[in-house]
Amino acid sequence: MSETNTTTQKKTTTRKAVPKHIENKRVTVKVANTEIHIGETYEIIGKRDLDAPSGFIEHNTTKLLMAGIKELRSVPYDEISERFDTGFEVHSACNFKIPSYEKEVLVKQYEKLIKEPYEKAYNKDVNAVNSDFWMGNIDGAKPYICEIYTGKTFDTSNAKDLFDLFHALKQGFVCEEGEKDSDLQKAKYCIKNKNKVLSLQEERENDKFEANFVFSTLLATVDADENDTLYTILEWMQISNIRGADKDTLKRTFIKLISNEKSGYDSAKRFLEAYNLSDSDKGREKMEIFAMLSKLQLRRKIEFKRNQYFLEDELLGNHLKGAAELALQKSDLRERIISAYEEYCTK
């Protein structure tokens, strides 16, 4: 059982006002440009600002990194319509950018999944004209406030957290990392799905572990003449001058590849993909042809001009892996590549 599922089960006993139609199902609702998976946990994180001072950039934030700093945000009031911009009405200003063909459907989801559970759990009326809820009243009732700060989490199995996250996204207080919408980009904070981050991290660690195991297995029997699978895989990953290297060199090369802080996980995944490709006859042949093309390029027998590769007068395409694929389909091209390789690279 995955850690995500285990976490979800543990939280079941503390859920508040989650409708029965949500229980035991993975319900998703789109708010702004974010897909909220109800039952999962989201966290506010710093937003990278390349125009900020260097210390801010290093810590991925536009805000001062001091404990206790919070922004208290509320839902705006429209003087013209005399209504609060709740997002629970088709004509709410914050729904303006939703295409007309899906606006009504989304608003119904907002009502059913977010508004109604909150009203039921806290015995509140969040109607767009209820100023007592949104602004408070003279009898001491507090206005609706959404606290925004780095590190704040929203457990969307909790009706209030889901309600707060909805408004934080709808009003543009937070946005997804890499948000493309110019209006939503104005948010000072970003949001991340903690469940998804954990799942991705687990997947990456598993890839690294498996890549290490496969590499060690191949390294034990590697031989340039008898068993060259490891060389072929590394060449496919475009590591040049690796064929014939001793085991210590191969080991150092691989460790450097997957230990890289930025690209290590991706390298592990690409290594496994290349290994799987080498397991089929066609895949192995394509990889071998690519290795030949790479060596011909190093010997300057392949030209790159006008963004395309040429073997003498033969057009290979705009990348060598595509040329290797093409060679599998065209026997005359395959034979020409092999002939050129034997002539220029084996002597």
Image: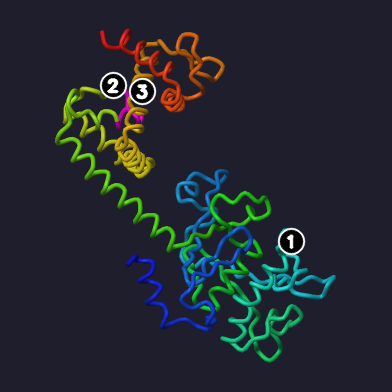
Find the residue positioned furthest to the left: 220
Q: Would residue 260 appear left or right of 121 to someone viewing this image?
A: left
Q: Where does label 1 land, which residue?
A: 101
Q: Is residue 308 covered in magenta?
A: no
Of the two numbered discs 3 and 1 in the rendering, the one whose residue sits closer to the viewer: 3
Which kind of residue does numbered mark 2 sit on?
Asn
Q: Where is residue 264? Give x, y as percent.
A: 34, 42
Sequence-wise, which precedes: disc 3 or disc 2?
2
Which kind of residue does numbered mark 1 sit on?
Tyr
Q: Where is residue 11? Give x, y as percent.
A: 41, 77
Q: Tell me the CA gap for discs 1 and 2.
A: 57 Å
Q: Are marks 3 and 1 in contact (CB under 8 Å)?
A: no
Q: Would residue 84 appear left or right of 147 to someone viewing this image?
A: right
In the image, residue 28 above or below residue 188: below
Q: Tell me the CA gap for discs 3 and 1.
A: 51 Å
Sequence-wise, which precedes: disc 3 or disc 1?
1
Q: Which residue is pictured at 65% across the width and 87% down the height?
A: 141
Q: Which residue is pictured at 64% across the width and 61% down the height?
A: 32
Sequence-wise, which precedes: disc 1 or disc 2?
1
Q: Where does label 3 land, which residue?
A: 289
Q: Where does label 2 land, which residue?
A: 241
**Element under disc 2:** loop
In the image, residue 224 above or below residue 140: above
Observer-nearest of 338 and 169: 338
> Magenta stretch?
233-241
